[in-house]
Amino acid sequence: MESLTDPDPPGSAREILHRSLVEILRFLLCPAQVALTRLAVSEATAAPEVARLFYDNAMGGLSAAFTRRIAGLAAQGRIRCSDADWLGSSLVGCALNRQLLRRLTHPEAGPPDVAELERRVSALLDPRRAVSRLRGLREPVAERARTAGAFISANIEQDR
């Protein structure tokens, strides 16, 4: 996880966040990690402590590292962000959503297509692209997407 551990990664804030999200997705969506996630979920009732440890060390740990990256960029004045925890967990959750669920329920899905992950993360971090896909969505969903797009646009800008 190079971009999550590098104290001063190169590039604009958007590029740094993009690389970090793609790395997180590549790790969490690799077949071995998906198999471990499936196992942890299936055994959560019988062994809740094991499931908690798994979450804390996989998804929770990566989300926390991403949140620290966001907080660091905000502290450097490279992005505006009043709630790094919310933004970090929201972006990781949005990036993972269907990708993880599909792989959990379709073991034959295999490793993620890196080009597709790149496109999804690019769209997530570029509200103009995300909002352009709103035609045809039910209004409550479209409004939430517009709100998220406005938040991202206002908070994750190219370095000033």
Image: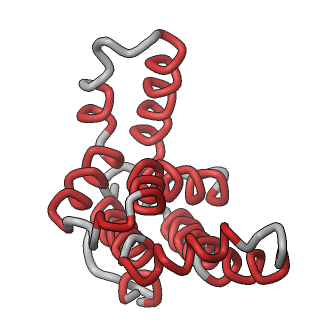
Q: Position of residue 3 (x, y in %)?
A: 37, 82
Q: Residue furthest left?
A: 115
Work out whether residue 25 or residue 112 is closer to the camera in this orientation and state it: 112
In the image, residue 128 sits, relative to residue 58, either above or below, namely above
Between 32 and 28, the residue placed more toward the observer is: 32
How many dots with numbers? 0
Residue at 56% x, 50% y is: 90
The answer to whether one can see residue 76 in this image is no
Q: Is residue 93 placed above or below 53 in the rendered structure? A: above
Task: Specify whether 95 is left or right of 37.
Answer: left
The quarter of the picture where residue 10 lies is: bottom left
Which percent across, then down, holds residue 40?
Answer: 66, 75
Q: Position of residue 133 (x, y in %)?
A: 26, 25
Relative placement, left or right, of 4 versus 108 is right
Residue ID at (38%, 15%): 137
Applied colour scheme: secondary structure
Residue 109, can we see it?
Answer: yes
**Quadrant occupied by the N terminus:** bottom left
Please say if 132 is above or below 5: above
Residue 101, image x, y percentages: 47, 54
Which quadrant does the C terminus fall into?
bottom left
Quadrant of res 129:
top left
Left or right: 151, with 50 as reference point: left
Query: Is 131 left, or right, of 68 in this rendering?
Result: left
Q: Residue at horizontal 50%, vertical 59%?
A: 92
Q: Residue at x 22, y 60 (%)?
A: 118
